[in-house]
Image: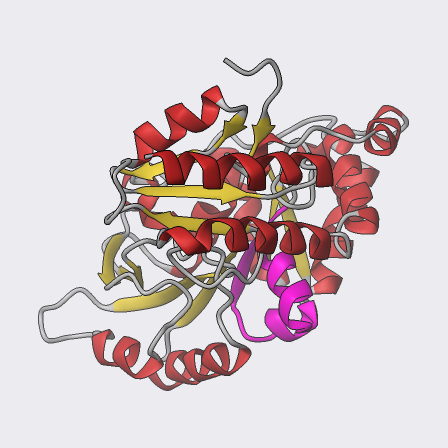
Amino acid sequence: MADQFVDLRSDTVTRPTAGMREAMATAEVGDDVYGEDPTVNALEAEVAALFGHEAALFAPSGSMANQIALQLLVSPGDELLCDADAHVVTYEIGAAAAYGGISSRTWPAVGADIDPEAVAGMIRPDGFFAVPTRAIAVEQTHNRGGGGVIPLSTLRDLRAVADDADVALHCDGARIWHAHVADGVPLIEYGRLFDTLSVCLSKGLGAPVGSLVVGSADKIERARLIRKRMGGGMRQAGILAAAGRYALAHHVDRLADDHAKASRLAEAVAPFGVLATTVRTNLVALDLTKHALDARALAAVARAEGVLISVLGPRTARLVTHLGVSDADIDHAVEALPRILTAS
């Protein structure tokens, strides 16, 4: 068994840098439930401005931020449309139904390759004794879609679909920073297409905690009540918000390094027929359908070689580059993984 590990399981395993820890230690704080934490207030204003919206709300997690946004857009008993692999219906433990009373319907999982016309055909209007559609949710970048980036043209078409049907459009933007860096689309351009967004600080940006809900001032005023109802009201949260502000200042442009490292991993595994999608950002999806090793077996052998990978399904695995992965780590992984795939 290896003594040291290259952790490619997720970009959630990052640890605060020295500069981030210093920012947290010296943060000015107050009681955020009273709206009196100046560092939280500054973070919320900064993120709202980045996306061209009126306001934002700091939340403990991406799942909570998503679920707050969905409750802003969809009343209990009404319908959300999203894809079958979307985080909001795959990894949030049924929260849309359990907390929001929201009915969900999905289109087949296609990652970032969305057909707006097909989505338009799924929308159900009021009446006809059917559950009416109130919102569409998309994921940028797409986790189970191998970090795929939804093209700006597709998002504009979806915005037109939503407007024509008078429904809302939500973006689960947990890794939208990666899309911004990969395609060069300004964050404000993304922001103007969506009624609400959730954006995460604790993945690629490397903060230890936190996401934000972004939207209009009246929506965010309601969002504060929903956050409190869900147990998300925090007190001296400026210590956490300071990490997010540091991440925004220092860790966005460097995401290009993660993309380059992911491309190196993709090149190493591509000859073995397991690369599931073209790698655009920091996620490398592996399809082991035709390989001798299944996902758990691959993860076990890789661990013995000092490489940690994520198991997403019986024949699906994932490699993720992030702030905590060095060039030397990638050197080790691109040497070990081909050897493992060849031996099996």
For residue 140, side relative to residue 87 (left or right)? right
Please count the marks in the image. 0
For residue 84, side relative to residue 234 (left or right)? left
Q: Which residues are magenta?
A: 176-200
Q: Which residue does the image show at 25% across and 39% down from the upper left?
A: 292
Quadrant housing the C terminus: top left
Give the vertical position of 256 relative to 235 (above or below): below
Q: Which residue does the image show at 64% across and 45% down from the upper left?
A: 204
For residue 70, side relative to residue 101 (left or right)? right
Give the vertical position of 251 relative to 109 (above or below): above
User: In x, y percent, where is residue 14?
Assistant: 65, 32
User: In x, y percent, where is residue 92?
Assistant: 37, 40
Please say whether residue 60 is visible from this viewpoint.
no
Give the vertical position of 143 relative to 332 (above or below): below
- Farthest residue toward the left? 129
Closer-to-camera residue (225/209): 209
Closer-to-camera residue (43/295): 295
Please say whether residue 24 is visible from this viewpoint.
yes
Q: Which residue does the image show at 63% across and 71% down from the upper left?
A: 183
User: Is 86 inside the magenta-drawn segment?
Assistant: no
- Residue 81 is drawn in which quadrant? bottom left
Q: Which residue does the image show at 53% across and 55% down from the upper left?
A: 267
Give the vertical position of 20 relative to 213 (above or below): above
- Residue 114 is drawn in which quadrant? bottom left
User: In x, y percent, where is residue 112?
Assistant: 42, 67
